[in-house]
Image (cartoon, grey):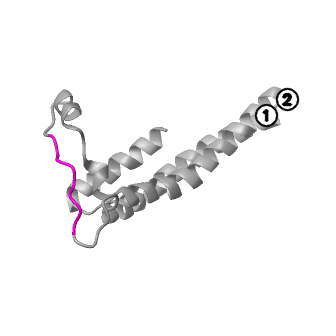
Amino acid sequence: MDYEVFVLARIREEYDRCGSTDDAVVAALARTGRLVTCAALIIALSLLSLSVSPDIIVRLIATALAAGILLDVIVVRTLLVPALVALMGRWNWWMPGRLARAMRIAPVPPPRPVDGESAGAG
């Protein structure tokens, strides 16, 4: 989960810099891809090293956690998160007024559909 927050924070930084959701997703994944993948591989390999333990419970837990981490990095980080952020478009950056006031940031009005654009994408 930490690296998902890291990726999403980078997407937001890139969006603030360029103003385009699609460009932000591409740039953020290009900048964070190696770091997040290497971190996940290190954790997965560390857990897999526990799979040679003589205790069967430790083997099962270590192998399952390693597989879960690799699945999360491959499916969630590289496929689902970028696809959903790109699909949601400008709606990613809208925050309800009450929540914005509670966080003491300027509220952003919801995006309006542009000609030829559906209401849910942007």
Q: Of the numbered discs in the image, which one, if any, rests on residue 69?
A: none
- Decide: is 43 above or below 37: above
Toward the bottom, the furthest residue is 116
Q: Nearer the viewer, residue 103 or 74?
A: 103
Q: Residue at x 41, y 42 (%)?
A: 5
Q: Of the numbered discs in the image, which one, if any, rests on residue 56?
A: 2
Q: Is residue 89 magenta?
A: no
Q: Residue 13 in the image: state x and y as whole percent.
A: 27, 51
Mark 2 → mark 1, Cα distance in angstroms:
6 Å
Q: Of the numbered discs in the image, which one, if any, rests on residue 60?
A: 1
Q: Secondary structure at mark 2?
A: helix
Q: Residue at x 45, y 59 (%)?
A: 83
Q: Amino acid at mark 1?
A: Leu
Q: Residue 53 in the image: state x and y as whole percent.
A: 81, 31
Residue 105 occupies quadrant: top left
Predominant SS along the magenta part: loop
Q: Assign the C terminus to one quadrant of the image.
A: bottom left
